[in-house]
Image (cartoon, helix red, strand yellow):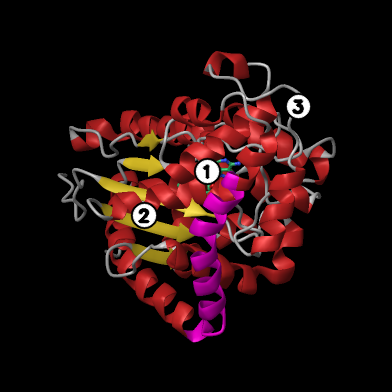
Amino acid sequence: MKIMLKSKQPSKRIFSGIQPTGNLHIGNYLGAIKNWIKLQEEDDCIYSIVDLHAMTVPNNLLDIKNSTLEVAAAVIASGIDPKKSILFNQSNVPQHTELAWIFNCIARIGWLNRMTQFKEKAGKKKDNATVGLFSYPVLMAADILLYKATHVPVGEDQKQHLELTRDIASSFNTTFNKTLDKDFFHLPEPIILGPAKRIMSLRDGKSKMSKSDTSDGSRINLMDNKDQIYQKIKRAKTDQHPIPDNINDLDDRPEALNLFNIYASFSNKSVKEILQQFSGKGFAQFKESLSDLIINDISPITKEMKHLMNNKDEIIKILIDGSNKAQEIANEVLIDIKKIIGINFKD
Ligand code: AMP
Ligand code: TRP
């Protein structure tokens, strides 16, 4: 029997997600949100506050509602326009968890065992991690494929999860392409842009700037005020050498390289140009200029975030409208998937 599909494959569709886990920092802003904003000008974009992913770490449950609204406020304040993009919170579209179950029955334990993010997050007490944390990348695959997304803007840390998404999509395609005479899923590609692929901690140039770092001085939060930004940049780790004129001389200087990458992202200049501007000078002058740049970009966002957080109903309305639009797309794709598998007799 021939299967009639309801859903269409868009020629280009962007999907990305961000976890509502508080402490949004300039790594999230430069590595993800800033790219989201660029993309919404040209493309069909769907962005999600992934509250179900945040739940995989039980501590995050303590403040999940407020964190979801805060991250939504940050995304809107940074420039995501709900008229141009679909913005919604993941749990409002139940199709995500339904597809995740189906993908749980496709993904292999061996594939998940390779995921470095799980190893990092679970740490030494692996048995104590939730089952949700282990299958986190399967839910992420469901997020992306539920909309037949073609491109996924993320920071470099998510590349491995994207590869797993492609493995799940290919496995589904190979299992069912006889039924359909063609592949159902297009294999999505990551978009990893700019010098901010991986912003490092201000305290240690070898570890990623992270929401969960116990040292607040390791990151610049989007809610930090001007003084905090000046202080954190002033105290950011560097070394005794002067600023070089050649980028190759930064090879063994991860902290310095990180600060130049941050400067490059905020100024839209290349690291080469920045080195020309500051070479031979000490870090004090460079750091002052860097703080000014960050403050110039971040302060209006912080102000708008505070305004939105005082109008939570406005944020909730945007998320509900977005969820309704997302659900229309998700529903058609999920009905198709269930038909293809043969587990849906109703639709
Ligand atoms: P998360 O905070 O883990 O939900 O990440 C949200 C988005 O920010 C993802 O696209 C990450 O890849 C990106 N991201 C998180 N930390 C960094 C970082 N230190 N540098 C660049 N991108 C990051
Ligand atoms: N795992 C991503 C992160 O930690 C967040 C995320 C969840 C995501 N679902 C997604 C990113 C789908 C891109 C696409 O950053």
Q: Earlier in the sequence, mark 3 or mark 1?
A: 1
Provide the residue designation for mark 2: 37
Provide the residue designation for mark 1: 138
Residue in the picture at 75% in, 27% down: 239
Residue 22 at least partly seen: no
Residue in the picture at 63% in, 57% down: 54
Residue 120 at least partly seen: yes
Most foreground residue, 170 or 271: 271
| Bounds of the magenta segment | 289-313
Q: CA distance from mark 1 to mark 2?
A: 26 Å
Vertical side of 134 occupied by 84: above or below = below
Q: Are marks 2 and 3 in contact (CB under 8 Å)?
A: no
SS state under label 3 = loop
- Nearer to us of marks 1 and 2 is 2
Task: Give, as a three-letter code, the residue at label 3.
Answer: Asp
Q: Position of residue 272 (x, y in %)?
A: 46, 24
Most foreground residue, 260 or 96: 260
Q: Are marks 3 and 1 in contact (CB under 8 Å)?
A: no
Q: Is residue 28 left or right of residue 3?
A: right
Q: Is residue 312 left or right of residue 109?
A: left
SS state under label 1 = helix
Q: Is residue 306 magenta?
A: yes
Q: Quadrant of residue 68?
A: bottom right
